[in-house]
Image: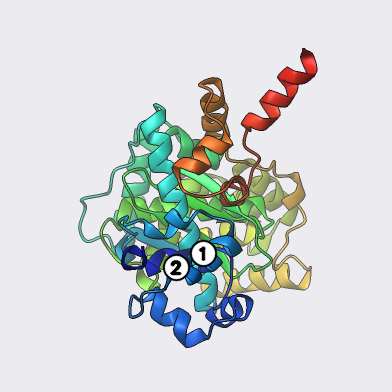
Amino acid sequence: MATEFNGLELKLLRQFNELSLEELGGKLDYTRQYLHKVETGQTLPNDQFIDKVAHYFNVPQSFFMQLKPVLQEDQIHFRGNRTAKVSFKQIVIARGEYIKRLIEYLDSKLKLPKYDIHSSEDEPIAQNPVIEFIAEQCREKWGLGLGPISNMVRLCETHGVIVTTFSSISKEVDALSLATKRPVFVRNEAKESVCRQRFDLAHELGHLVLHDGIVTGDRLTESQANHFASALLIPQVMMRTHFPTWYRNGRYNWTKLGEFKQTWKVSKAAILYRAKQLGLLTQEQYTSGVIYLKKTGEGITEKEDHLIPEEKPELLQACFTMLAKKKIFAEDIAQALDVNVSFLENLVNMEIPKKTRVLRVVEEST
C-alpha cells in the first residue's frame, strides 16, 4: 500500500483544512520535516501513518491513492490583495482543485449549460481601446445590449461557468477562477459588498477572455482584467451619456451618483475610476472624489451597499436537486469523490440532499 501513496493528495487536503505543516504535525505527532517529505514524495509512509492521517481527516485510505491530474499554474487566475499570505492562496487553490473534481463528476451525470465564453484572439490586448472593444463584443454575443447587467452570477452560470463560494474570516483572498474544461469561479463571502462581488466576477470573466494560457497575477494582467470588468459592467457610451448627471461644472452630485450606482450595481469607487479611465475625470478630480468617500466613511462600505440585492449561485444547487431526483444523494457523490459528506458540503458551502433524510421521511410517513 505504501508505494501507492500520493503525497500531493495529503498536501491538498491539509491546505483545504487550513492547516500548516507544523499544525498537522502536532495533531498527528509527526515532525514538520517528516510531513514535508511525505507530501513531496521523498518518503513513503507506512500503513500506520496512512491509517492515522485518514482517521484524522475522516476520509477513506483510498483518498491518498488517487493519481489525478492537478491544476497547472496557468489554469489558475488568482484574485487577492498583493499582501495576501501565500498560505491563504494555497487554501483557495486546494479548494479549487476539489471543486474541479466535483464539476467533472457533475458533468458526467448531468447535462449542464454549454460553456460558450471564448478567449479573444485580438492582439495586442495590452491596448486599452482593444479591451474596450472586446468587452463590447462580449456584451453583444451574450445579448446584454447596453443596459445594466441584472445578475452577474446568473450571467456566468447561463454561459456554463460554475460559481461557488467559500466562507473565510480573511478578506485577503477575493476570488479565483479555474480555466478548465468547464471554468469555475470561487468567490469569498467575507467580501460583503455585492457591488465588489459583481466586479470580482466580471474580473474573472476578463481573465477567461483575455488570458487563456497565460500565467496571471502580475500588475499588467490584473490591470487588463480590471479594465475589462469596468467596460463590461458599464459600457463607455452609457458612461459618457450619464456622466453629466452626477458631475457638472467641477462638482459632484453625490445623490445622483448614488442613484447611478444602484442602477448599474457598481460601487461609487469603481464608477469614479471608470470615469477617469475614459478621460471624463482628471487625476485631480478623481482623487478629490476618492478622498470624499474616505472622509464620509465610504472607503470600504458605501451607504447604498445594503440596497443592492444579494446574488447567490444557483447552478450547483440545481445540480444537486436534479441528482436527488435521479436518486443520487450527498452520500453517493461523496463516495464517488472519496470524501465524506461534511467535506463535500464544506466544499460547496451549502447543504446537499441526503439519502438518510429521505429514508427518515419515508419511515415517518409509513
- Total label count? 2
Amino acid identity at mark 2: Asp
Q: Residues within 10 Å of mark 2 (few under 14, many from 20)?
A: few
Q: CB atoms at circles 2 and 1 under 8 Å apart?
A: yes
Q: Is residue 81 visible?
A: no
Q: Horizontal placement of 72 versus 281: left or right? A: left
* Foreground residue among 272 and 35: 35
Could you say where residue 97 lies in the image, as x and y percent from the top left?
42, 56
* Foreground residue among 11 and 148: 11
Q: Horizontal placement of 120 versus 58: left or right? A: left
Q: Residues within 10 Å of mark 1 (few under 14, many from 20)?
A: few
Could you say where residue 172 lies in the image, as x and y percent from the top left?
59, 70
Amino acid identity at mark 1: Asp
Residue that appears at 43% across and 81% down = 36
Which quadrant holds residue 321? top right
- Whole-angstrom CA distance, mark 2 to mark 1, is 6 Å
Tag of residue 47: 2
Could you say where residue 349 lies in the image, as x and y percent from the top left?
62, 48
Residue that appears at 52% across and 55% down = 200
Q: Say which element carries label 2.
A: helix
Residue that appears at 34% across and 34% down = 141
Which quadrant holds residue 178? bottom left
Seen in the picture, residue 14 relative to 149 is either above or below; the reply is below
Could you say where residue 150 lies in the image, as x and y percent from the top left?
57, 36
Position of the N terminus, as image quadrant, is bottom left
- Which residue is disc 1 drawn over? 51
Q: Say which element carries label 1.
A: helix
